[in-house]
Image (tube, coloured by chain):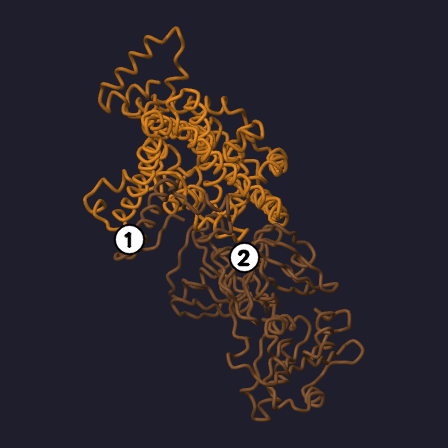
Amino acid sequence: MTVLQKKPENPIAHLSAEDIEIIGKELDTIRQEVRDSLGEDDAKYIRRVIDVQRKLELGSRAVLLVSMFPPAWFVGTAGLSLAKILENMEIGHNILHGQWDWMRDPKIHSTTWEWDMASPAAQWKHSHNELHHTYTNVIGKDNDLGYGIMRVDEDQKWHPLYLAQPLWNFVNACFFEYGIAAYDLELGKNLATKKRRNDPKFRAAAKQVLKKIRNQATKDYVIHPALSGPSFLPTLAANFTANVVRNLWSHSVIMCGHFPEGVETFEKSSIEGETRGEWYLRQMLGSANISGSKAMHIMTGNLSHQVEHHLFPDLPSNRYAEIAPKVKDIFDRYGLTYHSAPLYKQVASAWHKVIRLSLPNGWLAETTPKNAPAQVVKLVRMTTGGKKVRRELSRAA
Amino acid sequence: MTTTDPRPTTAAPRVALRDRVLRFAELVTTPLLPSDYLDLVDPLRSGADLRGRIEAIRPETRDAATIVLRPGRGWRPHRPGQYIRIGIDVDGVRQWRAYSLTSDLTRNDGCISVTVKAIPGGKVSNHLVHRARPGTIVQLDQAAGEFCLPDERPEKALFVTAGSGITPVMGILRNHPELTDVVLVHSAPTADDVVFGHELRRMAADGRIRLIEQHTDSAGMLDARSIAELVPDLHERATWACGPVGMLEALEEHFAEAGLADRLYTERFRPSVVVTGEGGTVTFSKNGTTLEADGATPILDAAEEAGVLMPSGCRMGICYGCVLPLREGAVRDLRNGELTVAAPGDGVLVQTCVSAAAGACTVDH
């Protein structure tokens, strides 16, 4: 894939500027209808989810007090994993988006909420709500694309280091919450020079993250295991497992949002002077949905409705399902592709892209069982050779 | 939600122990607070944010009702005549309003009550009178207000009230039986509209008070002069008045002319309608900046142009990086024209990047 502006067939070439503004107006209308109908039932929904989550977490941790008994370990670990997923996805992510600010309840508000993640809410809100949601899929501006550590586009020059990117991606998935914290801190950029390392703003932010990590780790790996007495080690293992399960799950869901094949990326210069309609259009083209049951939607924090979420990031997540058909109708009428597929397909598609881009452009597509040995030789030569060899070989392709 | 208050360094051993237990509990529940879990079990426990549970709702007239509340354990007894602020969710949105306490302090079930008159178009009053149900948890503030009797009780008292203005006075009458010479002049549209009509008439029959009812639908409104005629010894009486602004102003003028301004205590119910328009004066309460903004410019832009350092984010209404509490006044959402209104004491959070002033407003920043 390549940025939309450089594609031979531009998928929005058939839309006039006027069309794009009308799309914007139609989407504004959908947003307004939901805003106008928010009420008691919505408030009840989020309070109920929070109530269930807290009870599930308390119950699971209580069961884990006797986690030396295997059935207790399994039940407690499953419950805690579920509770942690709910807490991060349907509750934390969405509250921090300001989706529930309209209730004016200071306990459920984007400015007061803190979540069970390594990244402090305030830092995450900046990098996610502000950067990612504003500059969605703009290469060089939206660091959610590969988190600054991966090759996410054919236009990025290939380097042998990228061969390891499937591994990086997997490690990042396992420890996703720390990856997110590092990424919110822009660790790579800020550790690069002495001046940046010593910047008081960076140091203060890093200190906050370390404090948060210490508190989280103390809770999961010291206090709760200690409370379990003789079940110390099983509880520690259970908490570790629950964190990894949560990390793998949220990483998978988030990867499905913008990474499956067919989702568009954009050039930096293309968003200069972007209108509201054009912004909407970029969100439509830059996101992909996951289809599935109601339970699956809740477990993904309704990020399974990534398209709807990106169009209306501050609308309560429980409403995305009902507006999805209306949004899809707009896609259909204007000849745009509404990407939606079951979880396993989207995950596979996203991983396929990670692997494809870890290899030189075109390598995976050209490789057949017949020419495999020759292709491997070529890859080895490109990996071990210098820049010049790489250039020659990729040109030959 | 993770912050904790700084703790005193020299504390009594018991406090230190409690402190340590609390700190340990915080380690267990981080990033939430222990109270977030305790609230699931007992929202009225001591140490919790002050809340109350609606125990009963008793109709008083066709459009007024008494709400009996069981306050949380942190409740401190009030003085008759004071009011409380109640925060209740109406259509899912937390709304705060002030209502006078009308309960008898000697009631032994630990409950308090406020009496609410539904005003036309009043979101909260109509909800409380017509739709709220017993069992609902509401947010509370401690009682406040100075519309109370002094420690040295007046020998002769006069109360002048209209409509729901009777409510703080009822709180006083029920709790101060030691007052022996009381005149109450009360105005309401009809006899049936008199809140506590039955109880007041019984008090009058028992000789506890002299009750003058003015039914304004048939007899018109009372002015200060006719009150003076109805109560010949008006100037000998300490007077408490509660009702519409016009009535209070007329009384204030009358007492000032007689040189008795210090004998009149008034209680104003705040006007519930905020004057809205296009644009207005925006005041930033913390840094003291005041500026004129038009109705098409986001407050964020106007403030930054005036040199105010503002929190900001996406500047298009999606990231909530710019929200600030609106303390008073009204703003309009530039995306849909929707008004957000804050009464004094509120702190409605608004997105300054997509909100323009709609009349004078005060932003906490």
Q: Position of residue A206 (x, y in %)?
A: 28, 44
Asked if the residues shown at circle 2 and circle 1 are in contact, with their CB atoms under 8 angstroms apart, the answer is no
Q: Colour of chain A?
A: orange
B121 in relation to A250, above or below: below
**Residue at screen point 40% across, 28% down:** A64
Decide if residue B245 is on the left or right side of residue B294.
Answer: right
Q: For numbered disc 1, what is the local secondary structure?
A: helix
Q: Colour of chain B?
A: brown
Residue type at mark 2 is: Pro
Decide if residue B298 is on the left or right side of residue A116.
Answer: right
Disc with the residue nearer the chain's start (2 vs 1): 1
B282 in relation to B185, above or below: above
A166 in relation to B237, above or below: above
Residue type at mark 1 is: Pro
Residue denoted by label 2: B71
B102 or A284: nearer the eye?
B102
Marks 2 and 1, how far apart at CA: 31 Å
B28 or A364: nearer the eye?
B28
Decide if residue A218 is on the left or right side of residue B34.
Answer: left
Q: Residue furthest bottom?
A: B258
Few, some or many residues within 10 Å of mark 1 (<14, 14–19, 20+): few
Q: Position of residue A88 (x, y in %)?
A: 44, 37
Q: Position of residue A200 (x, y in %)?
A: 24, 51
Residue denoted by label 1: B13
Q: Residue furthest right?
A: B218
